[in-house]
Amino acid sequence: MIKQVLHAGPVALLITGAALAADLPRRAAPPVFTAVPVFSWTGFYAGFNAGYGFDAGSGSNGSTTITTSAASGLIDNGGAPGIATFSNSRNNEGFTGGGQIGYNYQFTPGSGFVIGVEADAQYLGFGSGRNTATFTGTPNADITFVNPNGLSNLDYFGTVRGRLGYAFDRTLVYGTGGFAYGGGGGTSFGLPNSTSDSFRTGWAAGGGIEYALPADSFLNFFKSSAVTVKVEGLYVSLDRNGTNGAFAYSNSTGTVYNVSGTGYASTTGYTSRRSDDFAVVRAGLNYKFGTY
């Protein structure tokens, strides 16, 4: 009997221990935390922009006056010298729009310095109507007068710029500067074979602020963290080679009349070299390839 009790003791203890363990609270598995991705500006991007350009050059006002001798027959003024007057206003003001591509590199995700490079190409509607002259007398029907300053239209411009900024998570503040180019319209309005100087180069500098839209923003039509919007200001200066000073040509013979010629005209307000300076304020939207 005693042996039976001794043999039953361990079994009873195991049964009692199991019952007590069943009453203890169960240990739950530790929760699994998913790290929230930190936004980074690193990556290639492409987008479009639109804005407005403003004349920022000096000496854009005034006029050029060409006084032709009565004997030249260029302008008939009843035996008196004839006068042709051109406004030198560049009228560098108007709509601009285009596209851009670029690449950014952020040194530390979240907040930190960002470097990059961007290239853009823009339509530009500047300078229409600058070749209009007013006359004292009646110009010879065979003669076409052109502005000797060679003030050309700007139909387009573009830049290739470096960017340096600081990111506050999804907000990037930056400065930018680099190479600029532009052209269109020719150097001397209407003058045959005078468009060799229509393409000009120069520089551009400015700055802006860019913001990466949250994926749930109603403006974010891609519904990803790769859409950014920006507001940017640029100052652009395009230089030009010296103009040839031609102010008229014959429609029938092709003879070109130049301000340096003698015996047929005198000129005031003529500028043989000048630059096109303008400022652009624009807004843009980019899509960054790679969401983070």
Image (cartoon, rainbow, N blue to C red):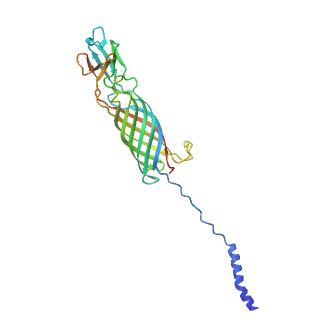
Residue 166: percent from the left, percent from the top?
Answer: 42, 49
Query: Who's the residue at 45% across and 36% down the image?
Result: 98
88 displayed left or right of 16: left
65 displayed left or right of 28: left
Residue 31: percent from the left, percent from the top?
Answer: 59, 63
Comparing 272 with 246, the one in front is 246
Task: Tell me where residue 20 sits by quadrant.
Answer: bottom right
Residue lying farthest to the top in this orientation: 78
69 displayed left or right of 93: left
Q: Does residue 100 sit above or below 110 in this rendering?
A: above
222 displayed left or right of 279: right
Q: Does residue 177 sit above or below 84 in this rendering?
A: below
Residue 112: percent from the left, percent from the top?
Answer: 43, 52
Task: Tell me where residue 270 sits by quadrant.
Answer: top left
Query: Who's the residue at 37% across and 34% down the image?
Result: 182
Residue lying farthest to the front in this orientation: 253
* Tag count: 0
Residue lying farthest to the right in this orientation: 1
Q: Does residue 37 sit above or below 133 in this rendering?
A: below
